[in-house]
Amino acid sequence: MAKVNGKGSISENDMFLFPVGEELTSDDIEGFVKYNQQTLATNYQENINMYKGHYPILDQEAKPLNKPDNRILVNFAKYITDISNGFFIGVPPKISLPDDSSNDDLQTFNNRTSMFDKLSEVAKQSSIYGRSFLMLYQDENANTNCAVSSPLKSLMVYDDTVAHNPVCFIRYSVDEDNNLTGTAYTDSEILNFDSDFKIIDRKPHLFKSVPAVEFIENEEHQGVFESVKPIMNAINSALSQKANDVEAIADAYLMFKGGEFDADMIKNMSDNRVIANESPDSDAKFLERPNGDGTQENLLDRLAEYLFQTAMVTNLNDVNTTGSADTASGYSIELKMQAMRSLASNKERKFTNALREFYRILFNISNVAKTSFVKKVVNTLTGNTQSNPADELSFQFTRNLPRNIANEATTAQTLEGIVSKETQLKVLSIVDDPKAEIQKIQDEEKEGITSAVNSNPANYNFDNQQKSGVEDDETDDEQ
């Protein structure tokens, strides 16, 4: 564990810690921000550069004497990140509440805030940086909203107890004149600070907790391609050298001997890659460099193999989709993705915990009168109890794999009478919201019954007849 300026420290897994019970000061904020800027952000910036296609090979010094100097790179960082996240969250997760009315309000909130798009961005950032943040705030219309925050310009501080409860969330920015300003969110206040880290403004917020949640890739806060960066750099170096060799072969010198040459002739020959040598014997041939093509190819194949093995991400170009049947083909693909499935399952557990905490903060808004959605959900699910509706949330993540709908339908049909209707429908990848689907089925059944009754020739409009009979009796009485 390392100390930072102020009373804070940072764990071996890059978690910011602060003594429980102590008051957060400007010095503490400065220590955390500067450590994030000067230490952690260096690696964050390298990772995002690699994801965008800027690798260290592009920054090497040029080779002397006009030697071939190719800078070829393959953006494996982007491939690994996008493939793993497409597999993990390419299909939006299903987040639901048990009460139908509350669940409708929850889905409305998720749709209004583009929650699933933000979750996709959070998942991508956590794969690049090892962590990402989702914060809650009140917009200008007093609606509760959320935003994604990158660890390049934000950090979460926890207390030093075994529970590691959040102490504050810090966001900052640097303008074109290199002046830094930012905001620290505690469990009750919003603290704005200037470039000298002096707290210039304090105001309360509506949330009863630190209004942000950290999503992590793993406990070590490492990105998905962090462990294979040396392999990626080695592949780019080998490819570039191979291109240099090809170019050198194309620029081979022609050497011949015999004959008499003057100075101008020798100069022209040198410009055209010709070497001449006066000799009584005559001969001409190209000078060839040693060819290491076989060695280079073996190296590249071995590096690529170790790259995907170490990153535990499937190389889709290496997946054999041929099989005797669709089921065999799908099963072979799933076997190839077993390592990536394990990574995704671990990430799912981390994300489930973070999402539950996110909604727990949302449902704990102190002034629920300003947020009708929160008020309705809390009143419906909790009544007079002190429990939080977040405890009732269910999360279902679906791996983005090729699906055989016919097989899923057969499985779902086999489960009839064994499990609940909702669990039965969860087997079907084409059903996004099992609760909504059940409601649609019930509505269709009611509509079918009503239509059948109305179209039956034996159906009499008893209500109208009874009303008509009453009206006739009243008429007779009047007469």
Image (cartoon, grey):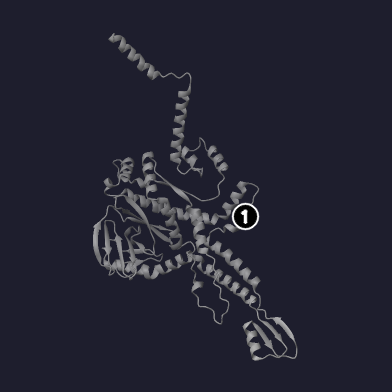
Q: Identify residue for label 1.
A: 320
Above or below 106: residue 16: below
Is there any visible trace of residue 420 in the rendered image?
Answer: no
| Residue 281 horizontal/vertical position (percent) | 75, 89
The residue at the far front in this view is 264
Between 339 and 185, which is closer to the camera in this rendering?
Answer: 185
Above or below 142: residue 194: below
| Residue 357 horizontal/vertical position (percent) | 36, 52
| Residue 224 horizontal/vertical position (percent) | 48, 61
Side (left or right) of 212 relative to 265? left
Between 7 and 314, which is closer to the camera in this rendering?
Answer: 314
Q: Quadrant of the C terminus?
A: top left
| Residue 11 horizontal/vertical position (percent) | 38, 65
Between 309 and 277, which is closer to the camera in this rendering?
Answer: 277
Amino acid type at image mark 1: Asn
Residue at 64%, 89% (x, y): give it.
Answer: 264
Residue at 49%, 53% (x, y): give it.
Answer: 88
